[in-house]
Image (cartoon, rainbow, N blue to C red):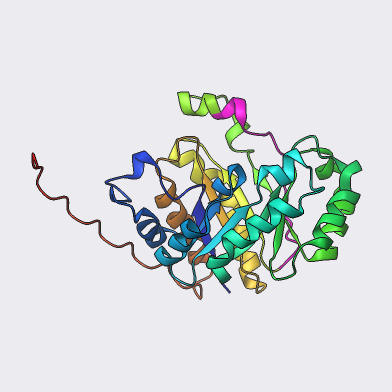
């Protein structure tokens, strides 16, 4: 029984000097705050194998990455004729070993129920050494989820919901919220797990109180999953993400109040003190 919590990234300018040092090993310090991270960067480009080896070196063996498949595979080729980019991707991420919690198949909004045969064929063709989690953006899947659930069950894959209901409950109040208001999808709420490793993406507000209020349903749901013997992963987002590492730990603490047998997160390492400025 484990609960992994994390952010959408492991490095943000506003975190430096607060959660992270200004040094190349920022991931190591992030891993002291959270025990998982969304691998969004792999969507835009497959990293060099040497880069990924550095990620492995900076994280403990129990740390988990949920890596997004490249957009070449999911958005440009729409899961077809993707053997070459997938081969390069699998080779690049090999150094992470068991730190790869799941491979995240985020599909475009234009990928609808009529494309499920393609998704089924794709998932059945993927290496069984990885677990897979699918995020869909077409609302039609949520009104009639049975067929998608059947397709995911064929390969033991999870359905990742992106809960934006708290964010879209009231109009934005900051520049960051206004920007997210235009970019983030308005997705229906889904709280059902398909596997023993459910994954949740939750988007709150820049107001901490509203973010915490909005995730209360997830505290209850996640606690219930833990009691059932599942090991959930929860990613906490806000429009500015300024407090995200701290919020992740707060979510973990709230779940632990309901499930006392859940082990606490380790304490973050203190940041190294900056030396005096010099001219040379």
| Magenta-drawn stretch contains 221 | no
Q: Which quarter of the rendered picture does the C terminus lie within?
A: top left
| Magenta-drawn stretch contains 182 | yes
- Residue 144 image point, x, y percent: 88, 45
Q: Is 181 positioned to the left or the right of 116 in the image? A: left
Give the answer, above or below, for where 160 lies relative to 77: below
Q: Is 174 positioned to the left or the right of 71 in the image? A: left
Q: Is 21 positioned to the left or the right of 164 in the image? A: left
Q: Quadrant of residue 34?
A: bottom left
Q: Is residue 219 visible?
A: no
Give the answer, above or below, for where 253 lies relative to 74: below
- Residue 119 image point, x, y percent: 83, 51
Q: Which quarter of the rendered picture does the N terminus lie within?
A: bottom right
Helix, strand or loop: magenta stretch: loop
Q: Which residues are magenta?
A: 180-195
Q: Residue at x 78, y 66 (%)?
A: 156
Q: Residue at x 52, y 48 (%)?
A: 236
Of residues 19 and 253, which is closer to you in this image? 19
Give the answer, above or below, for where 212 lies relative to 259: above
Give the answer, above or below, for where 29 lies relative to 226: above
Of residues 176 and 55, which is closer to you in this image? 55
- Residue 42 image point, x, y percent: 58, 49
> How many marks do you count on the picture?
0
Of residues 120 and 177, which is closer to you in this image? 120
């Amino acid at each position: 029984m484990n609960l992994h919590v994390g952010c959408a990234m492991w490095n943000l300018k506003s975190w430096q000097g607060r959660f992270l040092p200004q040094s190349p090993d920022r991931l190591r310090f992030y891993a002291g705050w959270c025990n998982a991270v969304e691998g969004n960067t792999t969507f835009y480009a497959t990293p060099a194998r040497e880069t990924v080896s550095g990620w492995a070196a900076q994280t403990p063996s129990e740390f988990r990455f949920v890596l997004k498949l490249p957009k070449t595979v999911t958005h440009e080729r729409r899961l077809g004729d993707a053997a070459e980019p997938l081969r390069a991707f699998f080779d690049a991420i090999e150094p992470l070993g068991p730190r790869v919690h799941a491979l995240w198949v985020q599909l475009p909004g234009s990928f609808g129920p009529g494309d499920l045969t393609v998704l089924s064929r794709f998932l059945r063709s993927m290496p069984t050494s990885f677990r897979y989690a699918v995020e869909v953006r077409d609302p039609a899947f949520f009104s009639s989820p049975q067929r998608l659930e059947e397709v995911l069950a064929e390969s033991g894959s999870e359905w990742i919901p992106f809960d934006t209901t708290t964010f879209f409950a009231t109009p934005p109040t900051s520049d960051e919220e206004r920007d997210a208001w235009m970019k983030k999808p308005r997705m229906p709420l889904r709280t059902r797990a398909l596997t023993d490793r459910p994954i949740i993406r939750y988007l709150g507000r820049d107001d901490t109180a509203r973010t915490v209020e909005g995730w209360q349903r997830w505290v209850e749901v996640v606690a219930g999953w833990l009691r059932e013997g599942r090991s959930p992963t929860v990613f906490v987002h806000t429009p500015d993400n300024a407090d995200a590492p701290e919020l992740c730990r707060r979510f973990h603490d709230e779940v632990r109040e309901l499930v006392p047998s859940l082990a606490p997160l380790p304490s973050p390492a203190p940041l190294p003190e900056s030396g005096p400025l010099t001219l040379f």
